[in-house]
Amino acid sequence: MKKLSILLILALFAGIQANAADKDFKPNGKVNVKIFSNFHSSFSDGENANAFEIKRAYFGYGYNFSKHFSGKITLDVANPKVGGLEMTALLKHAFLTYKQNGFKVDFGLIGTTQFELQRKAWGYRYIYKTFQNQHKFNSSADLGVRVAYKFSKAFSADFILSNGEGYKKLAADSSLRVGLGVTVNPVKALTLRAYYDFIEKHNVNQQSLALFAGYKTGDISFGLEYNKQLNTTNAADKDLDGFSFHTTYKASKKVKIFGRYDKLSSSDAMDMEWNLAKDGSILIIGLEYAPVKGVKIAPNYQGWNPKDAAQKYMTGIFMNLEIKI
């Protein structure tokens, strides 16, 4: 951690020096705010529950030191689901970026790369997380460094070295999570990506594989991903796998219609479903209306079908809201 702090200070100093040498550039910054809220009615086994929720609020600030150096800090305010706490602010991002000629480096408390592209392709994070984020295949942010290079319009690659604990648990240990991703655009409308990472703890190597294909043309887009994780949480022979498919149709400038289907499964050395309580599938169908810039309203249906026969099918009628400033 001490070495990480020293390197971050040196990088910040380099950014200031680069700015001093660039007389034509004027440093600038911007505040960013996102709020996710909803009202929903849930139905299961003849019982009904209603609730208003503020799921998350992000407060961030980005600053451009020069044409090539920038920094970002973000606070994530959400329910930690620990003890009697309702809403707690956590530091999610705090990093320096260097970017030039297709080369990019992020250093500090950074966004991870495992499902970053999938999140952008899905486009409705305020309604439901991406498959890997929802089922905790990885955290969306972590301490570390990520390096990316765009070789051409059709091909790019990225490497990430992180603490492996996520931004909610920054305590470091001797283990590091190493990941490599490759993104290909064979044609303008098609995006293909493959990602692999591993982290070793207690002499057990957790490995994650993520494959994604996205297609967007005109007013229609599709996304399909397959995910596999071996030795989940570094527990030997406890594996997870699943897929997610989503599509969006842009009906007008202000209206989009979307749908998504996910399925999660688990297995162990005895071919038993060790994660049975959380295995299952979900169907999401909805409509997004954007009346003005920065506001999105989405009435939608969510149906969770558990793999465990002892659990009941759960239906939810949601009214989700995103406010972006």
Image (spheres, rainbow, N blue to C red):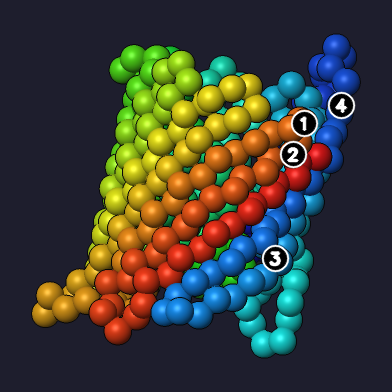
Q: Quadrant of the C terminus?
A: top right
Residue 55 appears at what percent x and percent y? Answer: 67, 62
Identify the amino acid type marked 3.
Glu
Is residue 113 visible in the rendered structure shown here? no
Which residue bears the numbered disc 2? 295
Among the 4 quarters of the image, the one containing residue 188: top left
Identify the amino acid type marked 1.
Val
C-alpha separation, residue under disc 4 versus residue under disc 3: 38 Å
Identify the amino acid type marked 2.
Val
- Contact (Cβ within 8 Å) of mark 1 with mark 3: no
- Contact (Cβ within 8 Å) of mark 2 with mark 1: yes
Q: Nearer the viewer, mark 4 or mark 1?
A: 1
Which residue bears the numbered disc 3? 53
Which residue bears the numbered disc 1? 292
C-alpha separation, residue under disc 2 versus residue under disc 4: 29 Å
Residue found at x 65% / y 27%: 254
C-alpha separation, residue under disc 2 versus residue under disc 1: 6 Å
Say which element carries label 2: strand
Task: Tell whether 130 sits left or right of 73.
Answer: left
Residue 234 or residue 138, whichever sits in front:
138
Q: Earlier in the sequence, mark 3 or mark 2?
A: 3
Task: Tell whether 217 sits left or right of 109.
Answer: left
Say which element carries label 4: loop
C-alpha separation, residue under disc 1 versus residue under disc 3: 22 Å
C-alpha separation, residue under disc 3 versus residue under disc 2: 17 Å
- Contact (Cβ within 8 Å) of mark 3 with mark 2: no
Residue 324 or residue 207, whichever sits in front:
324
Which residue bears the numbered disc 4? 27
Q: Earlier in the sequence, mark 1 or mark 3?
A: 3
